[in-house]
Each structure stands twice: as structure tokens, then as C-alpha cells.
Amino acid sequence: MSQLRLNIGAVALCAIWLMAAAAHAAGDERMVAGEGGYGGPYGIGHTAGPADIAAWNIDIDAKGNGLPQGAGTATQGDAIYRMRCQVCHGADLEGVKQTGGEPLVGGRGTLTGANPVKTVESYWPLATTLYDYINRAMPFDKPGSLQPEEIYSVVAFILAKAGIIAADQEMNAQSLPRVRMPNRDGFFPDDRPDVFDYN
């Protein structure tokens, strides 16, 4: 997958270079001089408006800011998991090596040992990250296709299977940020200042 991205990136870079070279040869100094931005205008795309930005502004922070309305339980999540997640993550959330689907539960107490098992249960410090990740990247074959109620339900199912929440506990924008993950204190803030010294 990363090789494919690298190849696509190389092709795109070559295409931009060829367009600039052709414009220069043709005498179109506007394209070469950078009018309109990074070497443009090329006559493609448009300035992102509020609706464009809103469609991509889907991040959820540690405190749950950005979580949408909706709710779900482990019982509801069970059926959704079986239909949309099980093929990659297994019937018992154990992961399916052939698909690349990682285990989602287990591994508590292994992180400081010789063979750490990183799962949602053992490694992830925040439950809000689970919602954010599923919302953006899952299911693998159709990311972003689940509705908020479905995501809350799948999150509840995973957390209940891991013994982090009660099986009947509802997950929503208020309850999810209050979930205490087993490895919550396993991380520490990086308080080094951001330095951008690209010169």
C-alpha cells in the first residue's frame, strides 16, 4: 500500500513538473511565476468554502469535543460488528492475520513485558479516540460509511467485550469521554516546544 502511494506521489510530482515545463516553453509566465499560489493556476479545483471544510472537520478530541448526537449500546453494536467488522477483526475480536485486522481486546498487563500486545483494551489511552478512528477509517472497505448511532454501538460493543464498561451501558457524547481506559496513565504529555527550523 505504501509503495502504491509512493508511486502515485511520484507520478503526480512528475505531472506537475511537466505542466510547468510545458507552460514555460509555451511562454505562459503566469504558471511559472506562481500567480495564484504554488505554480498555478492550473484550472483545476476551487477554493475550499465552509461546506468543503465542514465535510472534513470530523475530528474528535480527548475531551469529546466534536462528538455528534446519537447513542448506542453493546447489544446494538453486536449485530453491526458481525456485519461490518468481524471479517477483519474476528468473531471474538481476536484479529484476523490474513486480512491485517488487529486484535481489539486482550493484552492487559503485557505492555511492559517482552511480548507486548497492543489492543484497544491494553494500549489505547482514550475511548474518544476509538470513536474518532472508527468514524474516519472503518470499515476498511468503506471508511466513513457508518452513522453516529452505529459507531457509538460498535464502540460500546468493543469496550464491553474488553470489560471496560458494563454490557448495558449506553455510549453517547456525554458518557464516552468519561470512560476510563486501562492504559489511561500509560502516556505522558510531550511538553517540548514545537520547533519548526526548516532553514
Image: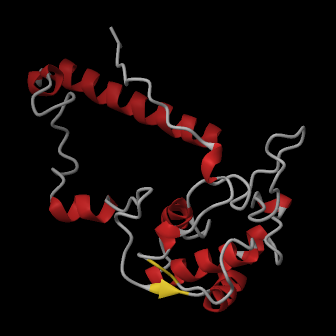
* Image coords of residue 119 (percent x, y): 73, 57
Q: Residue at x 89, y 42 (%)?
A: 115
Q: Is residue 180 above or below residue 47?
A: below
Does any portion of residue 47 appear in the rendered image? yes
Q: Quadrant of residue 65?
A: bottom left
Residue 23 shown left or right of residue 172 in the figure: left
* Image coords of residue 20 (percent x, y): 25, 25
* Image coords of residue 170 (percent x, y): 54, 86
Q: Residue furthest right?
A: 114
Q: Residue at x 64, y 90 (%)?
A: 168
* Image coords of residue 178 (percent x, y): 50, 68
Please tell me which residue lies in front, 144 or 72. 72
Please tell me which residue lies in front, 3 or 128. 128
Q: Residue at x 55, y 67 (%)?
A: 134
Q: Is residue 128 above or below residue 42?
A: below
Q: Residue at x 62, y 48 (%)?
A: 185
Residue 172 shown left or right of residue 163 in the figure: left
